[in-house]
Amino acid sequence: MIVFKIVNYEFSVDQKHPNKELIYKLISNITFEGKASGFDGVPSSTWDYVQNNLPQVELTVPLFNMYYDGITIKKADDSKAEFSSDINIYATNKSYFELVPYTWLAGNKQAALNAPNQVVLTESRAKLYFPNVQPTDIIGREINYDDKVFAVSGVVKDLDYPSSFQGVEFIQVQDAQWKEESWSSSSSNNQLFIKLKDPNQLPIIKENLKLKLEEMTKVAWKDYDITGYFEPVNLSELHFHPNINNHTDKKIVYGMIGIGIFLLLLASINYINLSTALIPSRAKEIGIRKTLGQRNGRVTLEFISETFLITGTALLLSWPLSILFEHFFKDYFPGQINDYDYLGTTVIFLLLLILGITILSSLYPTYLSNKVQIIDVLKSNKTGKLSIGSISLRKALIVFQFVIAQLFVIATVVIGFQLKHLMSTDLGFDKQALITLDLPYKGVDGKKDPYSFKKLLLKHPEINSTSLGHFPLSSDHWGNNVEFASDTGIVKVNMPFKMVDDTYMETYGLKLMAGRALTLADTSTGIILNEKAISGLGFKSPQTALGQTVTVSGEQRQITGIVKNFHTKNLHMQLEAAAFLPSINRGSLGRIAIKLNSDPKSWNKAIETIQKEWQIFYPNSEFNYKFYDERIKNLYEQDYRFSNIINLSSIITILISCLGLIGLVTINTAQRTKEIGIRKVLGSTVSGILGLLSKDYIKLIFISIVVATPIAWWAMNKWLENFAFKINLSWWLFIVPAVVTIIIALFTMSLMSIKAAKANPVDSLRDE
């Protein structure tokens, strides 16, 4: 149920949108120095070109992300309510409401965005701004976005299905936002949707866009070995497209489907094995029924009815458990999953599921029960000895169960060690005992000088040092080329730029190979490069690069220092060239790192001190700190989420497999009670009896380990290919899970076998 809820949500995004086969979003694809990249932003001038030059396009819909410091609403009593700016405020045109099928609660799509000072709200946003006010009464009410006043011209109902159209407030797009002439740069804030008249015209549109991009960028890109094109992606594919921000990885969704199927198969295997093991003991019952005239069809129906009843009961018991799981493990679920109603789909799925499980689990036990012969039952004094059918299938099912369980256990171990490796690898800087804060960038607090806050903190002995600027390992950076005029010509290397202050090297413990750290006097003249950067520029050593002049954005800068290579991105990526530029600009120094002393016992006091200074210096902003290693861990959020899913699946598969073993050993023990008694009378020990009852199952588990190991080795190798820095798959990573699995299986079987092995043989032998 849990897996279905997640998978159903992921695969339903945009699928209910009318005419989705005609709607496309433009993706910008760039190839630079042989490396391809893409994202869902376009040059702002693309809209004007498409609208006026491509008649094959029915609707051209721009979406420009708008950002404001604050939003103010005037209440009925003349007081003001303030709200933080939402990221889903878009400037667009009236075509947007032709493209997206909103239900209008107030206003209409023809007149909604006729003027530049109008705004359309979704119902949820309208309720936030104007609680307890009817949509029709909101029309004309004013909203202040910073110093701009907008009047509400429409209210639309929130979409009742998951969609890529996530806007909550819409204003009219302005000419200045789309009449820029530059085609050589794109922004993720500028997005463009198109609706085609005929999907067969798509190749013509793609070709025209490519030719236009080449025409407009041939001068700007000719010296940089850059090529590009626009890729129209259909709306139904957007949610899983890798170049879309916050996309979902389809492989993980398919992996969850696989996990759900495996869990159902394991449970069904248990039921099949236990049912077939019980058939000999039920043979007399079945034989008597047949003697009294019951036909095979009736026996089959009764077996299916029993299975359906058990499956239905399991479904009823699982419902509250799934609700509890969702409550305690919210991170496993997409954020908006509970905003939509899936009751009808879920009910249909569950009905089909229990019918499918019932049929799957009943087929083989029913087949065996119909093979019971009346004469065999009448000849047999103890039906528990009756042999019905081959048990090879039961053994194969046990092997299959433990192959799956072993795969999950090995995956748990390998993934766990790889994640540990990610957090323990030397990143080229010191991440320990670092408190990080995002500095305010809105309102009065956002205008304050961060250097002043830094000086306040340094007065306290609990704080060793502080630094402003981009974190070394993060997505924070600016990107540009560094150029060096060598003897053979101009060498260009594109790299991320970290904007920093004068204490950056000290705070992060970055190691200088040559030269000195940056000072504020170097703001317009200095630059620090790492080893990869100077190697790319053609320098043979840090010493030969030191003092050389390079060009950055048309400015001459002197290399004042060279640092050892450090990781600028997560360990999925290779080490890359990087640069540090000093800055005193408040806008580029939006984060601060605070180095605490090495004694963790003093950290609580230090954090309290930082919070007090924050509340004094930034009284209008919330204090939210994170240790830097927490931020680094967040870079691997998808990996940790995948790890949690695998860990949970591993526990469940082992549990289900062991439950199956318990049932089979229990039945086996019951059927061999007299044999065990005779063996004890003849001198067998408890350990001997345990071996007798367990050896066949242990052999099967060994076989499952042999089968699972090469499969796991291949699967883990494929998974580790996603990491540039990874562990080696040593033999013990497979032996340890195998030993653990065997120990768990032995312990499980021992629980049921010891009681039988210790029983008084007199009790079993005198019972006829």
Image: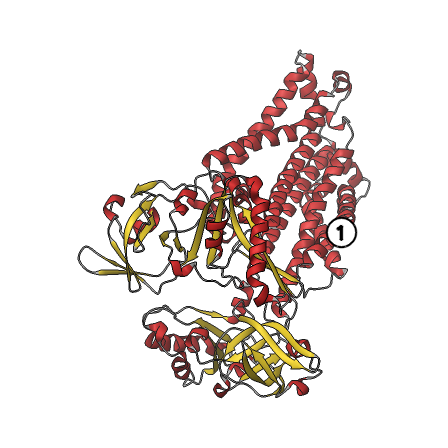
Towards the viewer: 567 or 535: 535
Going by the image, does 720 lie left or right of 81? Answer: right
Towards the viewer: 70 or 592: 70
Q: Residue at x 63, y 74 (%)?
A: 492
Q: Residues within 10 Å of mark 1 (few under 14, many from 20)?
A: some
Q: Is residue 100 visible?
A: no
Q: Position of residue 589 (x, y in %)?
A: 45, 75
Q: Quadrant of residue 234?
A: top right
Q: Position of residue 423 (x, y in %)?
A: 60, 67
Q: Residue at x 60, y 55 (%)?
A: 643
Going by the image, does 384 lie left or right of 208? Answer: right
Specify the amino acid type for callout 1: Thr
Q: Residue at x 46, y 50 (%)?
A: 52
Q: Position of residue 496 (x, y in %)?
A: 57, 71
Q: Residue at x 33, y 51 (%)?
A: 125
Rendered position, 158 above or below 358: below
Rendered position, 667 above or below 578: above
Rendered position, 713 above or below 401: below
Going by the image, does 682 lie left or right of 119? Answer: right
- From the image, tell me which residue sits under label 1: 709
Q: Position of residue 708 (x, y in %)?
A: 75, 48
Secondary structure category for the residue under label 1: helix
Rendered position, 198 above or below 308: below
